[in-house]
Amino acid sequence: MQLARRVLEVKPSPTLSISSKAKELKGRGEDVINLSVGEPDFNTPEYIKEAGICALKENFTRYTDTSGTGELREGISQKLRKENALTYSAEEIIVSTGAKQALYNAILVLCDPGEEVIIPSPYWVSYPEMVRLAEAVPVILQTRNFKVDPEELKKVITKRTKAFILNSPANPTGVIYRREELKAIAEIISRHNVYCLSDEIYEKIIYDGEKHISIGSLNNKIKSLTILINGFSKSYSMTGWRIGYAAADKEIIAAMKRLQSHSTSCPNSIAQKAALAALGGSQSEVEIMRKKFEERRNFLIEKLKEIERVTFPTPEGAFYCFLSHPKITNSLSFAEKLLEKEKLAVVPGIAFGKEGYLRLSFAASFGEIEEGVERLKKFLKTV
Ligand SMILES: Cc1ncc(COP(=O)(O)O)c(C=O)c1O
């Protein structure tokens, strides 16, 4: 069979494949601890589910506007104004099937073949693959202490640079960018008219009293170059509902709408009603989940400190810990053996472009976190 070159070059998502391997083992009755997952383990809050049920009962089951219902885009517009100090009209917003589709559509409408997209490493697994699918070129930028060094950023910008991907809070490291750091990045990319794809999907999962800052809120110039990407998956524990969105200049959003009209038409109508309820309801459940993540993070950090020579940046947001140990030389084979021998599923650092590391998710119970760290400790003694 001769498949298109486009798809032959794309690797499957390693996070999803490790998770499904762990699920398969679990299904066979194995005692697997799965710390590879990239989704909250909480149920979608009741008031959001109720809105979904209500939408069904009221037969809100037909195509909506390609870019999402007007009421949801209006709701997102208000949220961006209130929480992110950003003014976007409903025409400057598109709702998609998850943040993933919003991001992919943005890359497809921005990049011509051969144009470059700068991706700081370690990166979320899908960024380079999406760029390749657009026949653009991912330019991997090594970071310092897991954050972009402005001097290094300057060096990789060329005439072909079209966009830069920013992810704060970041997957897999959990680092967040502070205002001054964002200003330095914004200044450089604005000077070169490089677009900023700002993936803010973890904005509400943030610790130690820190506050998320949207790069587009810094000034009008960077706002005009920013495509903000966000969604409901992580904040509201709604991964399976598949609702994400992008906010950007009207022309970019209109192009994304044209593209979306020929691929998925519109996002799921029922899920859109649920998303609207998520925005409109009390945000106390979001805060309850955030607090639980923070407690689990603290617990995981304490447990990991018991393992000699393990190092990691303190996760300031998201729900991952990106750790290294001198014995993790080949992270893929380390993770495979760890799953095989100790039945502990984690994601190898190489999946995020960084060898020598593992990503542990703390979207898990205290018991699973404790047992997971015990298994890692035990395994490290045998290799
Ligand atoms: C950094 C990052 N961006 C985007 C996404 C995609 O989110 P969604 O479920 O809305 O497609 C994920 C999901 O794991 C992620 O980690």
Image (cartoon, helix red, strand yellow):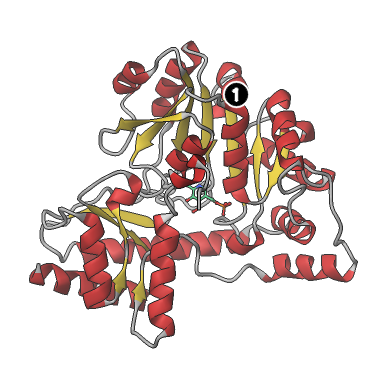
Quarter that holds the C terminus: bottom left
Answer few, some or many: residues within 10 Å of disc 1's Cα (few below 14, many 20 plus, some between 14 and 19). Answer: many
Give the quadrant of residue 332.
bottom left
Q: Is mark 1 within 8 Å of ligand 1?
A: no
Under tag 1, what secondary structure? helix
Vertical comparison of 111 with 358: above or below: above
Q: Is residue 300 visible?
A: yes
Residue at the disc numbered 1: 223
Give the quadrant of residue 297.
bottom left
Name the spot of residue 119 as percent of width and height, x first: 40, 33
Vertical comparison of 313 with 296: above or below: above
Residue type at tag 1: Lys
Name the spot of residue 172 as percent of width and height, x first: 37, 50
Foreground pick, 342 / 183: 342
Name the spot of residue 257 as percent of width and height, x first: 74, 36
Vertical comparison of 359 with 72: above or below: below
Q: Residue at x 37, y 48 (%)?
A: 174
Name the spot of residue 187 as percent of width and height, x first: 45, 16
Q: Residue at x 66, y 61 (%)?
A: 241
Foreground pick, 213 / 93: 93
Q: Is residue 216 left or right of residue 270?
A: left
Q: Is residue 348 left or right of residue 265?
A: left
Judged from this view, the residue extending furthest toward the right is 58
Q: Residue at x 57, y 47 (%)?
A: 100
Q: Residue at x 31, y 26 (%)?
A: 149
Give the quadrant of residue 286.
bottom right
Foreground pick, 129 / 249: 129
Q: Is residue 295 visible?
A: no
Judged from this view, the residue extending furthest toward the bottom is 29
